[in-house]
Image (cartoon, helix red, strand yellow):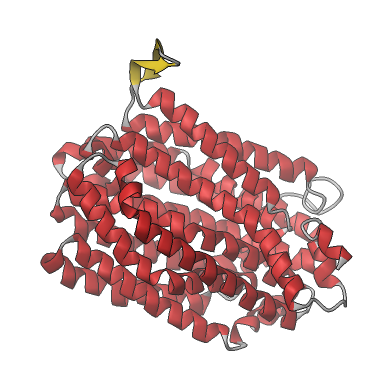
Amino acid sequence: MNFLRKEKHTLSDIVRSDMPVGRLQQLRLAVSLSIPAIIAQLSAIIMQYIDASMVGSLGAGPSASIGLVTTTTWIFMGLCSSAAVGFSVQVAHLIGSGRAEGARSVFRQSLAATLLVSVTLAIVGFLISGRLPSWLGGEEGIRENASLYFRVFALSMPVLQYSYLSSGMLRCSGNMVFPGIAGVVMCVLDVVFNFFLIYPVREVILFGTPVSMPGAGLGVWGAAVGTALAETVVTALMMWQLVFRSKELRLWGGGGGFRLRGECMRRAFRIGFPMGVERFLTSGAQVVLTMIVAPLGACSIAANAFAVTAESMCYMPGYGIADAATTLVGQSLGAGRKWLARQFAYTCVGMGMAVMSVMGVVMYVSAPSIIGLMSPDEEIVRLGVMALRTEAWGEPMYAVAIVAYGAFVGAGDTVIPSCFNLGCMWGIRIILASLLAPVYGLHGVWIAMCVELICRGTLFLLRLRTTYWMRRIDKINEK
């Protein structure tokens, strides 16, 4: 039991050893890795929540302008994330098998490869930013702000790409703490930058004394710039940690140069490409949902965007646990301990269901307060509360889908899980939403979402009970 006191620092040693790891020990390892990851995920959502609240105070129009393009930003974010995962999973396998020099080589190649991906995405995003709001069916009054917001987002793509890459590399090397701290720092910086960029010069009361507070008065544009600046600072900190401080991945001590090598690129492609396609088409489904919601009016668009942000507080702990599952499963399989990988997967899925079930109850009870903090508009609050309370019923099975997917990614098994996500999104959510929205309005859209999440979680649970998802690592290593 003594070795568990340093599990955050010696994970690769634990999974490579021949020592048995009991259920309680597995749980402690999973918890120790999950907590920093959950903090990082929650910090990101709190940042979105703060953005929404600050912009929401300006009225329904500015809120709707951001909500209109939010789902499109998910497409670009998903592609960046997939590119990073293709390399970080390889790093987890290599560290688990004790090949630190190979892990450093993959990291170096990833820096060049993902930069090319992000620059391409930035160019595409900039070029479509002017027409995107009209393509999505947004009202004339919100199009200009929506274009501005998306344009700033697109130009920050290289920073976002390295943010995903650096946090993924740190997690897969067993360092969950630094990304967690970085997430908190980013949240604080986002508040500070937004405070001075969104609002104009104004008078505030501090300790009973009126004080003139400076401000740029940029509104929606200020929210985008503030987030980009916070992301830039934190990404620089995480890259510094990787390049200079990481024992496994720092850029000296062997590992070759930055030249792209065929074997590494092929493995990254086999792992990341199915995820990229899935996230592109899944986020595309979210865009279609936005188009389904858009004719319902500005209040429905804003309420839908606020509810999506608020719901993130419920499911982001699941993504934190999924990050831990990716690391634990990836390093266990890299060390050749398939039984341990399977047990870690079960442990993490159980944790995810427990945490997200509790969060679902909290979300149901506190929905009026949550939405009320983001908007003073009574109609937006009414619609947002309805959406959150509908979605709360699907959170336990959503946890299964999220965490099991993280475990499968750690095994390099991304094709079938990606098909599950795509099939459920397009075959269930979109069809049901298109049928129910004309009859029940925004409520019908969220009923469709809840039904789809329950079906998706069931499919992931059935696959988790098999051994097929662990066979992918053998095929990857053979090629």
At a point 86% along the width and 64% down the height, the residue shown is 3
At a point 62% along the width and 88% down the height, the residue shown is 467
User: Number of marks in the image?
Assistant: 0
Instruction: Determine whether 194 is above or below 108 in the image.
Output: above
The answer to whether residue 79 of the structure is visible from this angle is: yes
Considering every residue shown, the one lying at the far left of the view is 439
At a point 29% along the width and 38% down the height, the residue shown is 56
Q: Is 368 positioned to the left or the right of 188 in the image?
A: left
Q: Is 212 positioned to the left or the right of 434 in the image?
A: right
Q: Quadrant of the C terminus?
A: bottom right
Frontmost residue, 189 versus 290 = 189
Q: Quadrant of the N terminus?
A: bottom right
Instruction: Determine whether 470 is above or below 53 in the image.
Output: below
Instruction: Provide residue 356's location: percent of width, then percent of height.
Output: 48, 65
Considering every residue shown, the one lying at the far bottom of the view is 466
Instruction: Determine whether 64 is above or below 361 in the image.
Output: above
Instruction: Provide residue 130's location: percent of width, then percent of height.
Output: 27, 40
